[in-house]
Image: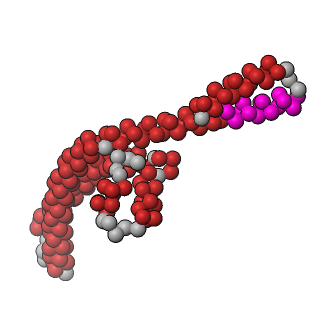
Amino acid sequence: MFGISIHKLLTIVGRNLDPFLLTKLVSLIQGEKNNGFDVLYHNMKHGQISTKELSEFIRERSAIEEAYSRSMTKLAKSTSNCTQLGTFGPVWDVFKVSTEKLATCHLELVKKLQDLIKDLQKYGEEQLKAHKKTKEEVSGTLEAVQNIQSITQSLQKAKELYNIKCVEHERLKKEGAAAKEIEKVLSSGYGAASHW
């Protein structure tokens, strides 16, 4: 198993865990065709990329909000040049105040987005440290998983070769082929069987 013994896993999750559930947990970690570790490792590695992408998206959004806030502030200032007399005087005041408030709201959003970017950068740095630490700790496990996968592939190929040789042997027996030819197929079949 991936460098984690049942004893260590019991220590981590607690001794009251049902052995059947523990076995299920181990099989979930291993995953189908022993790819569970690779999936977990890939997700951890991809988390850094996702953090960077999200940070960049928020940075772009912040720039857009800041430009919008400046444009709204400029628009609000331009209303002071308009005629305040007549029936539209109160409407101009409402538009000016609401535009200024909207600009202020967007400027506050920019500040919050920038704080969020700082938090994401801090999280990304922590994530990178955790990834490096985990990478060092599980390097043996990664190697073991890769060996298991390599052995499993070799075993499957040897099994297929052995099955092909068995079918060929049966075919030659039915056709009444020469003993030397059957012996040749048998010897190559035994070679495949020893790999399997």
The question of residue 75 being in magenta is answered with no
Q: Residue at x 76, y 22 (%)?
A: 183
Q: Residue at x 17, y 62 (%)?
A: 112
Q: Main secondary structure of the magenta part?
A: helix
| Relative image position of residue 75 (x, y in whole percent) | 17, 62
Quadrant housing residue 176: top right
Q: Is residue 40 left or right of residue 136?
A: right
For residue 12, above or below residue 129: below
| Relative image position of residue 172 (x, y in whole percent) | 83, 28
Quadrant containing the C terminus is top right
For residue 106, above or below residue 139: below
Residue placed most toward the observer, 189 or 79: 189
Residue placed most toward the observer, 158 or 99: 158
The magenta stretch is 161-175
| Relative image position of residue 88 (x, y in whole percent) | 19, 78
- Looking at the picture, the colour scheme in use is secondary structure
Q: Residue at x 87, y 32 (%)?
A: 174
For residue 132, above or below residue 26: above
| Relative image position of residue 109 (x, y in whole percent) | 19, 63
Residue placed most toward the observer, 70 or 108: 108
Q: Is residue 152 left or right of residue 65?
A: right
For residue 4, say whether it is visible. yes
For residue 63, say whether it is visible. no
